[in-house]
Image: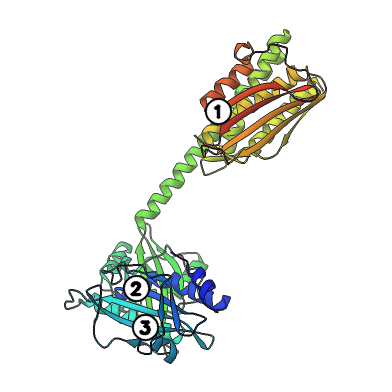
Amino acid sequence: MPSLAEVVDDHTSLEPADQSRLELLVRQWHLVADLAFSDLVLWVPDTDPNVFWAAAQVRPATGPTALFEDVVGDPIAYVPEHLVTGAFVTGEITRTSANKLHAGTPVDVIAIPIPYRGRIIGVLERHTNQLGVRRPSGMELQYVAAADDLATMVAEGSFPVEAEWLDPNGPHVGDGMIRLDPDGDVIYASPNAVSAYRRLGWWLDLEDVNLSTITSQMAPTKDEERHEELLAALSGRYARDCEADTTSAQVLLRSIPMQRAGERIGALVLCKDVTDLRRRERELVTKDATIREMHHRVKNNLQTVAALLRMQARRIDSPEATAALQAAMARVSSIAVVHEVLSQVFDKTVDFDEVADQILRMLATVATTESAATVRRVGSFGTVSADVATSLSLVVTELCQNAIEHGLNRGPGQVDVVAEDLADSPDHVHRLRVRVVTTDGAELPEGFDLNATSSLGLSIVQTMVADLQGEFRLENLAEGHGTCAEVVVPRGL
């Protein structure tokens, strides 16, 4: 199904500003559909004045649909008696004189012109399913009356409201609807709206009370800016989103000013009880904070262990024992780096460039105390899952230490850690390739067997890579002296 932009671009001569206006209408038209219990179709004029195209469609969340098939992308030919044609040509709302059948269902149809900058840029067609019509309730009469007011505002060019910042996930008609008169007094409040204000603590009738006055009394705030936003919204003079908070309840409010012929006739206020939602959000924030604190404490504990290993290494005379403790210290420190990064983020992925850079700085510091070796990162690791990050940090640490100790024999030289993205793998698994390259260093001895090695570091790498369901190989460089250790692992498990 084509998008509104595609229909406009392919079939019309509408300008970018016209398209923006239509997109703004589509972002807000669920209000009209739900209040009118109607399907809405947006028709735009073709470059051929005899044709219109359906550019967007929405169904009501409050009643049965009248259009069982999607019509977006369909054209209609210019017919003088067609409602869309009549509304487009006259600039006035047109409607059927009696219910017409659509797929065997009686449907009431009206067409609303959409003016903008002195001309008609489209037509909003409203289809209402009349099957099983009964005597409407008081709430339904108020809904339809509000929908008719909005239809008039569309035809006059005062709806949609110019408020790009209105949250599309804000309150809807079914959450609760209040109608205000020009003074901000309540004319009507739906049952859900009454329940929301009961939650705030208002137990009297809502009708005939000033909404901004009672709301500011029940939900006072010391924040002057928030207080002014609340008063501005509930006065009905401005389109606003705001929230009324008490110690036990939170209600989200949205005000839509209503006018006719340029005169204010009141406002619609949609309200949604978000008390339980806010409580869950607070629980999630608390949970995230707890997890981050756990990572922070684990990082601190691991750094303490690394410091103890460093102190122990300084007090041992055996070079072999000192080297073993230093290797253990590097392993613990690399895991600590991962937990440090995880303590600073909210999601389950890690920017591994930051982890790798900290590990390489640590290894370079150790290397420069014993040799003139340098370690650098080439390319970007990108993001990996937290499950992969810990193992990958150990793999990088071990391969770099192995390169410094055996590839360069703790002498001068350079170790390159090359990261490469492998997004286009045949099995569609997003993988990462890491190569640790030592140039102008020692080569692997003839007959070297990775599976038969006694090196603890290489055994750790093999185990970690196998756990990640990855691949590992170690080989001499094709040209020149040196070795290349290559690891390919998935970015997430």
Of badges 2 and 1, nearer the viewer stands 1
Residue 111: numbered disc: 3
- Is disc 2 in contact with disc 3, using a CB cutoff of under 8 Å? no
Toward the viewer: 397 or 208? 397
- Where in the figure is residue 298, as x and y percent of width and height? 54, 30
Residue closest to the eye, 52 or 131? 52
Give the label, 2 or 3, closer to the camera.
Answer: 3
- Residue named by callout 2: 33
> Which is more N-terminal, label 1 or label 2?
2
Residue nearer the viewer, 439 or 37: 439
Which image quadrant for residue 363?
top right
Amino acid carrying label 2: it is Ala
Side of 142 relative to 122 (left or right):
left
- Quadrant assignment, res 309: top right
| Above or below, comparing residue 479 to residue 446 in the picture | below
Expressed as whole percent of the image width and height from the top left, the position of residue 401 reads 70, 22
How far apart are the two marked residues, 2 and 3, measured between alpha carbons?
Answer: 13 Å
**Residue 182 appearing in the image:** no
Residue at 37%, 69% (x, y): give it.
58
Task: Give the residue type at disc 1.
Answer: Gly
Could you tell me which residue is drawn at 35 percent across and 54 percent down? Answer: 276
Mark 3 and mark 1: Cα distance apart in space: 62 Å
How packed is label 3: few (under 14 Cα within 10 Å), some, or many (20 or more)? many
- Circle 1 crowding by C-alpha within 10 Å: few under 14, some 14–19, many from 20: some
* 416 left or right of 386 in image: right
Residue 6, percent from left and from top: 51, 68
Residue with the mark numbered 1 = 470
Marks 2 and 1, how far apart in space?
53 Å
Q: Is label 3 in a helix, a strand or a loop?
A: strand
In the image, what residue type sits under mark 3? Ala
